[in-house]
């Protein structure tokens, strides 16, 4: 039976003090691991972009070689390094967080990780309302910081609450500066160049909000702004793809994504995509340092 394997990556970078949170969270692999994973797969799959894979899956009745799409969430600049773009890629940048001169803020999770990486105060930390009773050290409890209540609070908070906590963290952790968006993310011109080389550019929301937490007007703004970016970068092309931020979606959100104009949407559920798979519930394999590729 025909099948499409969709890989989900975020960052490909060396492991060091400035990337520790990504490796702890599982959203980074080293260049060596990335190429080992891809080279092992290359012996038994055909690499395609997501839309190419979906077209072949449904138009070629007897595709004997499994298809494989390599997707990257969040639009990090990493794909320009380490020969990553030697392979066909599907990229999901965040519309308001590109590497442009006028962009002033990081995606909130990148901002949070940057604060932890650059903290001068790393021990006995208390945060009003969150950590009053039990001070927590960064170096001895990085998993707690990356996956625990502070991160979850940031995910669920309003924009005002999130900004207030990030400011509190900046002061409490004694952080002087954080990286700029230009250091982290691909610019529009770079994305256009990648699209011209055959890579696919999809949507990933306007600000990386969990769509299930938004009001209807907020949801529409997130999706429309994301779709307009894809149109701007790729022209009025068909077969535009979307990726649910943080994997959060519902039937209503899937319908809204389709209505805006996207043709496919990726989840974070694990599994193969086959001809009968819903176009707006495409599963992916989350690729980590220890992924064995037993697919």
Image (cartoon, rainbow, N blue to C red):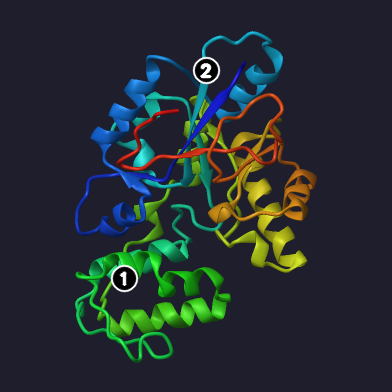
Looking at marks 1 and 2 on the same chain, the residue that comes earlier in the sequence is marked by 2
Up the image or down, 6 lies above or below 289; here it is above
* Picture residue at 20% right of the left edge, 59% below the top: 17
Instruction: Mark 1: give few (<14), some (14-19) or many (20+) Cα within 10 Å.
Output: many
Tell me the quarter of the picture where residue 101 sits: bottom left
Up the image or down, 2 lies above or below 80; here it is above
Up the image or down, 121 lies above or below 110; here it is below
Could you say which is closer to the camera, residue 119 or residue 230?
A: 119
Residue of label 2: 66
* Picture residue at 26% right of the left edge, 66% below the top: 117
Q: Secondary structure at mark 2?
A: loop
State the separation of the CA atoms marked 1 and 2. Answer: 42 Å
Q: Label for residue 278?
A: none
CB-based contact (under 8 Å), mark 1 and mark 2: no
Instruction: Mark 2: give few (<14), some (14-19) or many (20+) Cα within 10 Å.
Output: some
Tell me the quarter of the picture where residue 126 sits: bottom left
Q: Position of residue 47 (x, y in %)?
A: 47, 21
Q: Position of residue 63 (x, y in %)?
A: 60, 11
Residue 104: tell me if it is visible. no
Could you say which is closer to the camera, residue 9 or residue 222?
A: 9
Q: Position of residue 244 (x, y in %)?
A: 60, 50
Q: Secondary structure at mark 1?
A: helix
Q: Position of residue 142 (x, y in %)?
A: 27, 66
Residue 187: tell me if it is visible. yes
* Picture residue at 33% right of the left edge, 91% below the top: 133
Residue of label 1: 115
Q: How many marks?
A: 2
Q: Is residue 186 left or right of residue 200?
A: left
């Amino acid at each position: 039976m025909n099948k499409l394997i969709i890989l989900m990556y975020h960052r490909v970078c060396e492991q060091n003090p400035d990337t520790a949170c990504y490796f702890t969270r599982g959203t980074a692999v080293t260049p060596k691991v990335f190429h080992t994973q891809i080279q092992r797969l290359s012996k038994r799959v055909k690499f395609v972009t997501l839309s190419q894979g979906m077209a072949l899956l449904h138009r070629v009745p007897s595709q004997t070689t499994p298809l494989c799409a390599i997707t990257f969430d969040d639009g990090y600049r990493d794909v320009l390094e380490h020969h990553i773009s030697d392979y066909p890629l599907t990229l999901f940048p965040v519309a308001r967080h590109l590497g442009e001169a006028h962009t002033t803020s990081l995606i909130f999770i990148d901002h949070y990780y940057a604060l932890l990486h650059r903290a001068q105060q790393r021990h006995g930390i208390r945060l009003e309302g969150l950590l009053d009773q039990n001070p927590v050290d960064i170096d001895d409890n990085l998993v707690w910081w990356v996956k625990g209540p502070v991160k979850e609070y940031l995910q669920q908070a309003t924009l005002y609450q999130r900004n207030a906590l990030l400011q509190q963290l900046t002061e409490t952790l004694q952080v002087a500066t954080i990286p700029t968006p230009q250091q982290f993310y691909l610019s529009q011109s770079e994305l256009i160049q990648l699209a011209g080389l055959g890579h696919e550019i999809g949507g990933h929301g306007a600000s990386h909000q969990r769509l299930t937490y938004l009001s209807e007007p907020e949801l529409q703004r997130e999706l429309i702004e994301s779709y307009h970016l894809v149109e701007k970068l790729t022209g009025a092309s068909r077969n535009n793809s979307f990726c649910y931020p943080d994997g959060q979606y519902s039937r209503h959100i899937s319908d809204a994504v389709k209505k805006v104009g996207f043709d496919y949407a990726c989840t974070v559920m694990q599994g193969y995509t086959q001809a009968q798979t819903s176009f707006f519930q495409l599963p992916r394999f989350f690729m980590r340092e220890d992924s064995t590729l037993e697919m």
